[in-house]
């Protein structure tokens, strides 16, 4: 054999090894799990939701939305493969990181080996579906984000009609929303593209592009890889989706009320509000008293608050996919939101019970309801609410593209003891409650927060624009005087 | 050398002729019989109506989900009549399903294993979402600019077609093992031609009413009538 032949074979061998080692990092990282060891772990950790038979019908299944995965079908939402079977790495990642916006938690607390054993056991529920080895999904060449790419992405978003499900501005409020069902016939909500921290399969560029290209199996989300005008449109769409909302909600710990000297506009769409930084507050389902709300609709409210010498105003923004008023025939309720305060600022850390007070300590509720407007009431618990006579508060709301914006106003100083008076520099407890009537929420079926604090900034006055220049001019004058005196002496 | 070429040529010729002579002709093309099937259903038609909240200029304002369509004389439309046990090779016939007026047209398409053209003549987004077990299920977007898509259905089975954008859209693709099938018209009639003579069980399948079979004897050059009644 000629040396060239040997060299060629050697080179081919090296390439082969290299391609095995480097071409598929998933394969390198993947470990062969032990399904039998995984079974014991599964029966300890997973049966509660996914069920003994792996059919997603565990005892907790009826309480969770979206429903737990039915492993017997071998269908998985999140995959990086071009065919139906996900890679072992895909399953491992979901077990490790969990699925945002669902009841699936992260199991990173378990050692790697145990998670690989779970992968092996979960696959065993539909062994025939994993006979065909996963083929790697080839994404088109990455296109970096730019103004132009985002513009093209928006064009494509409109051309392929993403809005049908995801809504014009991406809040998951499209006209097909109510009709959507998953492969098992359960209603399924389209993703709110402005809140990408809730994306089930992750919010990185590659993850978003992969979902667009391959679709989300078992759901209405189809594959688009062959259904865009040019392959790179997948990346333009990704860049556009990334431009629709922030990376993270950046939750606030304190609600700051900005001092203003001018009149406060009533219109929630006024430019005035856009200039203020929102305080984002997370809301959770009310699960303390019956009927409970395990799958709340409203999970975030953005609060912008201002005050002047006469009044205090709260500008609230929250997503709600349907604008609904009370309709008892259709079992629909009105959308609503409320702010809760103690009737008077409380000294120290004592506060009424956060769930709308109790028999001994009442709370004051400033509430807006679609079709009814703003009301004020005193509550001694979530079912003991009494309206306060003589309204002092006003409000105005607008609804567009799956989002409410609301302004509620009230005099800073209250005439009665049932309503709090707001004073600058005082930490005032505040809590929030929201109802998505279109999702059947009313009464105790709400989303809420525990107590937060609200603080009115130090009042601003014109003096801060006057004093510093005056001081500067005086200093200059003194310096000039000193120089002149010194010159004269010399 | 020349001799060798000559021999080779001769062998090639003989083999070629033999192959042509032995190739099975189009199944039952000559001497086959015809089955004229009438499928009936004594029950009431099932048509669900849904108010349309989008694309009304293409879909209309009211969608009809035609689950059981009964015509005059109880004739049942959209049933697939077939002769599963008849022997005959599948012919490659181009089959097309159109998405038109937010409906799958025809509602039931029967084909032999192979390719199916999926047309979108609505100028709006549809998605082809299939429910199947033998064939891989598909969920592919078909935006307005994608007028045609081609998908493969290689295994015989009844495949459900849906569109998630327009939840009322429902269609079926009957992938049949042989070319002896027909889909009933509004009067419940279907004709299957060129069936090789013999005794068969004729099968009628309907998406909600299931399957019924009936024995028939097909005679060369003759037409055999068969009446099948579907039961709930």
Image (cartoon, coloured by chain):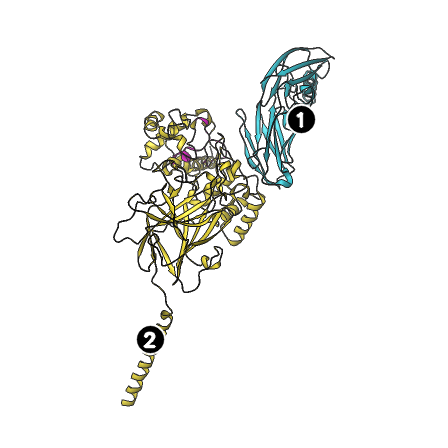
For the record, the magenta segment spans A72-92
Chain A, which colour? yellow
> Extreme left residue here?
A348
A9 or B231: which is nearer to us?
A: B231
Read off the residue under disc 2: A471
Quarter of the image where the C terminus of chain A is located? bottom left
Give x and y (percent) for residue A79: 45, 35
User: B224 or B48, which lies in front?
Assistant: B48
Magenta stretch: dominant secondary structure: loop
Residue that numbered label 1 is attached to:
B93
Q: Is residue A447 visible?
A: yes
Q: Does residue A232 show up?
A: no
How far from the left and from the top, in percent, is residue A44? 32, 28
Q: Is residue A79 magenta?
A: yes
Task: Indicate left or right for A107 with B59 as reference.
Answer: left
Q: Residues within 10 Å of mark 2 (few under 14, many from 20)?
A: few
Q: Toward which corner of the image does residue B210 lie, by quadrant? A: top right
SS class, disc 2: helix
Pointer 2 indicates a residue of which chain? Answer: A
Q: Is residue A53 magenta?
A: no
């Amino acid at each position: 054999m000629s040396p060239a032949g040997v060299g060629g074979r050697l080179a081919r061998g090296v390439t082969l090894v290299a391609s095995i080692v480097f071409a598929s990092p998933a394969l390198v990282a993947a470990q062969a799990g032990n399904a039998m060891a995984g079974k014991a772990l599964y029966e300890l950790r997973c049966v509660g939701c996914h069920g003994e038979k792996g059919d997603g019908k565990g005892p907790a299944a009826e309480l969770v939305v979206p429903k737990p995965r039915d492993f017997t079908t071998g269908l998985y939402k999140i995959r990086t493969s071009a065919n139906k079977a996900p890679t072992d790495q895909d399953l491992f990642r979901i077990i490790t990181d969990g699925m945002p916006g669902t009841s699936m938690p992260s199991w990173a607390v378990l050692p790697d080996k145990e998670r690989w054993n779970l992968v092996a056991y979960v696959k065993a529920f539909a062994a025939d579906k994993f006979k065909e080895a996963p083929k790697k999904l080839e994404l088109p060449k990455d296109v970096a984000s730019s103004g132009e790419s985002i513009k093209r992405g928006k064009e494509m978003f409109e051309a392929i009609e993403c809005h049908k499900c995801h809504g014009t501005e991406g809040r998951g409020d499209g006209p097909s929303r109510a009709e959507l069902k998953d492969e098992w016939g359960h209603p399924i909500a389209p993703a709110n593209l402005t809140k990408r921290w809730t994306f089930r399969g992750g919010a990185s560029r590659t993850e978003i592009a992969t979902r667009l290209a391959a679709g989300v199996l078992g759901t209405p989300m189809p594959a688009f890889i062959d259904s865009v005008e040019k392959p790179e449109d997948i990346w333009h769409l990704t860049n556009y989706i990334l431009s629709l909302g922030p990376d993270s909600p950046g939750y606030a710990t304190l609600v700051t009320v900005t001092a203003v000297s001018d009149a406060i506009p009533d219109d929630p769409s006024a430019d005035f509000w856009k200039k203020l930084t929102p305080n984002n507050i997370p809301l959770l389902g009310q699960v303390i008293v019956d009927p409970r709300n395990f799958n709340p609709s409203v999970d975030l409210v953005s609060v912008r608050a201002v005050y002047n010498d006469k009044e205090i105003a709260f500008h609230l923004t929250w997503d709600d996919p349907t604008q609904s008023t009370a309709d008892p025939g259709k079992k629909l309720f009105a959308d609503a939101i409320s702010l809760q305060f103690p009737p008077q600022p409380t000294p120290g850390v004592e506060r009424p019970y956060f769930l709308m007070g109790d028999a001994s300590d009442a709370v004051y509720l400033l509430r807006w309801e679609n079709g009814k407007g703003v009301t004020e009431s005193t509550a001694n618990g979530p079912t003991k609410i009494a309206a306060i006579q003589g309204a002092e508060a006003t409000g105005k709301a607008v609804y567009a593209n799956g989002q409410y914006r609301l302004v509620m106003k009230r005099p800073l100083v209250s005439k009665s003891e049932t309503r709090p008076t707001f004073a600058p520099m005082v930490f005032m407890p505040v809590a929030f409650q929201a109802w998505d009537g279109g999702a059947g929420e009313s009464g105790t079926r709400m989303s809420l927060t525990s107590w937060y604090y609200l603080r009115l900034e130090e009042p601003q006055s014109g003096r801060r624009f006057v004093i510093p220049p005056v001081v500067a001019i005086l200093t200059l004058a003194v310096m000039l005087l000193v120089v002149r005196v010194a010159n004269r002496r010399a | 050398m020349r001799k060798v070429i000559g021999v080779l040529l001769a062998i090639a010729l003989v083999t070629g002729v033999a192959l042509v002579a032995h190739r099975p002709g189009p199944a039952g093309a000559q001497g086959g019989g015809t089955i004229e099937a009438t499928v009936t259903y004594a029950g009431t038609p099932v048509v669900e109506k849904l108010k349309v909240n989008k694309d009304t200029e293409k879909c209309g304002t009211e969608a009809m989900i035609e689950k059981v369509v009964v015509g005059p004389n109880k004739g049942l439309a959209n049933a697939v009549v077939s002769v599963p046990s008849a022997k005959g090779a599948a012919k490659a016939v181009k089959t097309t399903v159109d998405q038109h007026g937010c409906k799958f047209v025809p509602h039931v398409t029967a084909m032999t294993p192979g390719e199916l053209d999926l047309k979108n003549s609505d100028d709006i987004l549809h998605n082809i979402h299939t429910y199947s077990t033998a064939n891989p299920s598909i969920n592919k977007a078909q935006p307005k600019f994608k007028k045609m898509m081609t998908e493969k259905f290689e295994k015989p089975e009844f495949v459900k077609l849906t569109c998630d954008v327009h939840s009322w859209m429902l269609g079926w693709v009957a992938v049949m093992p042989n070319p002896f099938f027909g889909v009933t018209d509004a009067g419940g009639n279907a004709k299957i031609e060129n069936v090789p003579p013999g005794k068969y069980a004729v099968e009628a399948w309907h998406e909600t009413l299931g399957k019924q079979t009936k024995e028939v004897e097909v005679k060369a050059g003759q037409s055999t009538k068969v009446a099948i009644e579907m039961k709930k």
